[in-house]
Image: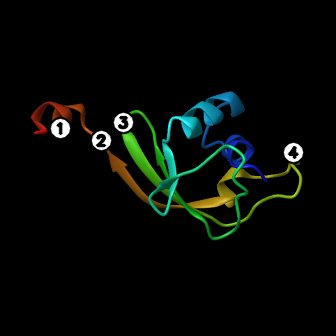
Amino acid sequence: MRLDKFLKVSRLAKRRAEAKDGIEAGRIKKDGRALKPGYEVKSGDVLVIHYRTKFLTVRVLQVPGRVLPSLKPADLYEIVEERKDDPVDWLNARP
């Protein structure tokens, strides 16, 4: 399954277009490298997702073959780490 579709199905992104934009902006990484929307997600992948004010690290548990109504998004991944990014830190950061 493509990364942009996986993010939508797992509800890590609200819309597939939103997921695609985030991926193209380099906000989703695996092993420190930015991914492309067409990246084929596999079980065991560890993805780092940068939202506006937080970083979310998730491990992919399963990739569904088809999207069914009985599919529970929370069963597709587990949260490894969640880190808040406080805007005050941006002001105190030194170049």
Give me the residue at 68% from left, 28% from top. Answer: 17
Give me the residue at 13% from left, 38% from top. Answer: 95
Per the image, label 1 sits on a secondary structure element best described as helix
At which x and y percent is residue 14?
64, 32
Location of residue 91 by image quarter: top left
**Residue 42 vertical position relative to residue 36 in the rendered view, above or below:** below
Choose between 4 and 13: the one closer to the eye: 4
**Amino acid type shown at disc 1:** Asp
Q: Is residue 20 left or right of residue 30?
A: right
Spatial CA distance of label 2 from label 3 is: 5 Å
Spatial CA distance of label 3 from label 1 is: 11 Å
First in residue order: circle 4 vs circle 2? 4
Whether residues under marks 3 and 1 lie with C-beta atoms below 8 angstroms apart, the answer is no
Spatial CA distance of label 1 from label 2 is: 8 Å
Nearer the observer: mark 4 or 3; the answer is 3
Nearer the observer: mark 4 or 1; the answer is 1
Q: Is residue 21 left or right of residue 50?
A: right
The residue beneath circle 2 is 85
**Amino acid type shown at disc 4:** Pro
Spatial CA distance of label 4 from label 3 is: 31 Å
Per the image, label 2 sits on a secondary structure element best described as loop
Choose between 80 and 71: the one closer to the eye: 80
The residue beneath circle 4 is 69
Whether residues under marks 1 and 2 lie with C-beta atoms below 8 angstroms apart, the answer is yes
The residue beneath circle 3 is 53
